[in-house]
C-alpha cells in the first residue's frame, strides 16, 4: 500500500508551519486497519491545504477501498495533490490527462506532468511520457523522442522502464525492431528481478534472438523466473532439463535433472489449460515413468505443492 509518508511536499514560504504528516495520524491508522470509511472522513477533514491527504483520498477513490470506484473523483484529488508537489500524484494525474478521465484528453498537459514527476524522482514517468509520443494519439507522433524518454527512465534505474523499452524493441507495432537492443534491456531488467524480463530473456537466449544462442543462460534465466512463480516458464524449464547433457559416467540424465524435469512439469500441469502444453507434459510424464525411481515422487510432489502454494493468491 502506498502511504502518505513516502511523499515530500513543498510548503508556501509565507504559510504558518504545519506538520502535514501529523495531521494524518488518525487517518493513516484507520487506513492501515482497513477502516476505509473513517480514513476517508479524516483525510477529507484536513484535505484543504494538505496534498498528502488529497493524494490518499485519490487512492481510496481509485482503488475502491470501502466505496465504489470513482475514477473521476480520484483524478480530481490527484490533480490537487500534484499541484502540491506530490510526485506520485503528478504521475497519476498525467495518466488521468492522457486518458481523458473526467475531461477531454490533453496529451501536452499529460507530458508536462509526467516530466514533473520524473524530475521529482518517479523515473518511470519519463517512460509514460514516451508512450504518448510513440503512439501519437494525444500528442504528435515522435517515436525517436518517445524511445529517448523511456531510455532516460531505464538509465535512471527504473526496472519497469527497462522492461518496457525491451518490449518496444522486441515486437512493438510502432517501433522498428531491434532484437539486440531488446535482449540488452531484457538483461538489464532481469538483473533487477523482473520475472517477465527473465522469462523473455531466457526465450531469446534459447532461440538465438538478438545474439548467439546460449542454452545454459537460457535455462538460468527461465529457472529464475519459474522459481519466482512465473508459470509460463515452468514447462520450458522442464524441457531444457530434459535436453541437458547426460552424466558422462552413465550416459543418462543426472538425478538432479530428472528431479527438476519432474517438478517443473508437474508445476506446469497444475498451471495450464492449454491442450498443446498438456499433451507435451503427458509425454514427459510417460518418459519419466521409465527412468525415474517412483519412491522419489512423494518428496518431489511435496516440493511442487509448497512452491505452488507460495505463489497462489490467497
Image (cartoon, rainbow, N blue to C red):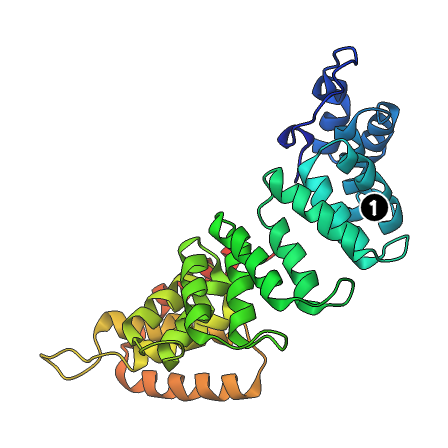
Instruction: Check the image and name the residue furthest to the top.
Output: 16
Q: Position of residue 136 (x, y in %)?
A: 73, 68
- Lateral position of residue 96 relative to residue 199, left or right: right
**Is any atom of residue 115 visible in this view?**
yes
Residue at figure coordinates x 72%, y 17% from the top left: 22
Q: Position of residue 249 (x, y in %)?
A: 9, 79
Residue at figure coordinates x 69%, y 48% from the top left: 114
Instruction: Check the image and name the residue furthest to the right.
Output: 103
**Is any atom of residue 296 visible in this view?**
no
- Please tell me whether residue 103 is drawn above or below residue 26 in the rendered image: below
- Please tell me whether residue 280 is drawn above or below residue 162 in the rendered image: below
- Please tell me whether residue 293 is drawn above or below residue 143 in the rendered image: below
Which one is in front, 218 or 276?
Answer: 218
Q: Position of residue 140 (x, y in %)?
A: 74, 65
Which one is in front, 17 or 297?
Answer: 17
Mark 1 element type? helix
Q: Which residue is mark 1?
A: 75
- Please tell me whether residue 15 is drawn above or below residue 251 in the rendered image: above
Quadrant where the N terminus sits is top right
- Lateral position of residue 60 relative to residue 266, left or right: right
Q: Position of residue 77 (x, y in %)?
A: 83, 39
Amino acid at each position: 500500500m502506498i502511504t502518505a509518508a513516502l511523499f515530500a511536499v513543498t510548503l508556501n514560504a509565507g504559510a504558518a508551519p504545519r506538520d502535514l504528516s501529523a495531521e494524518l495520524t488518525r487517518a493513516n491508522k484507520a487506513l492501515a486497519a482497513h477502516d476505509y470509511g473513517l480514513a476517508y472522513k479524516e483525510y477529507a477533514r484536513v484535505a484543504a491545504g494538505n496534498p498528502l491527504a488529497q493524494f490518499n483520498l485519490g487512492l481510496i477513490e481509485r482503488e475502491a477501498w470501502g466505496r465504489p470506484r470513482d475514477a473521476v473523483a480520484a483524478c480530481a484529488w490527484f490533480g490537487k495533490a500534484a499541484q502540491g508537489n506530490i510526485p506520485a500524484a503528478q504521475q497519476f494525474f498525467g495518466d488521468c490527462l492522457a486518458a481523458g478521465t473526467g475531461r477531454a484528453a490533453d496529451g501536452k498537459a499529460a507530458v508536462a506532468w509526467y516530466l514533473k514527476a520524473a524530475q521529482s524522482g518517479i523515473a518511470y514517468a519519463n517512460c509514460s511520457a514516451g508512450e504518448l509520443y510513440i503512439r501519437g494519439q494525444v500528442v504528435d507522433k515522435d517515436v525517436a523522442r518517445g524511445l529517448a524518454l523511456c531510455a532516460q527512465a531505464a538509465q535512471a534505474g527504473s526496472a519497469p522502464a527497462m522492461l518496457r523499452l525491451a518490449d518496444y524493441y522486441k515486437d512493438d507495432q510502432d517501433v522498428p525492431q531491434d532484437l539486440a537492443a531488446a535482449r540488452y534491456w531484457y538483461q538489464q531488467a532481469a538483473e533487477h528481478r523482473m520475472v517477465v524480463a527473465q522469462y523473455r530473456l531466457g526465450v531469446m537466449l534459447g532461440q538465438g534472438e538478438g545474439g548467439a544462442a546460449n542454452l545454459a543462460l537460457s535455462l538460468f534465466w527461465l529457472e529464475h523466473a519459474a522459481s519466482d512463480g512465473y508459470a509460463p516458464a515452468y514447462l520450458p524449464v522442464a524441457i531444457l532439463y530434459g535436453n541437458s547433457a547426460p552424466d558422462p559416467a552413465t550416459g543418462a540424465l543426472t538425478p538432479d535433472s530428472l528431479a527438476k524435469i519432474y517438478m517443473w512439469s508437474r508445476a506446469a500441469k497444475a498451471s495450464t489449460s492449454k491442450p498443446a502444453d498438456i499433451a507435451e507434459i503427458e509425454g514427459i510424464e510417460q518418459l519419466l515413468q521409465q527412468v525415474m525411481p517412483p519412491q522419489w515422487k512423494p518428496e518431489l510432489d511435496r516440493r511442487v505443492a509448497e512452491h505452488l502454494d507460495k505463489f497462489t493468491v490467497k
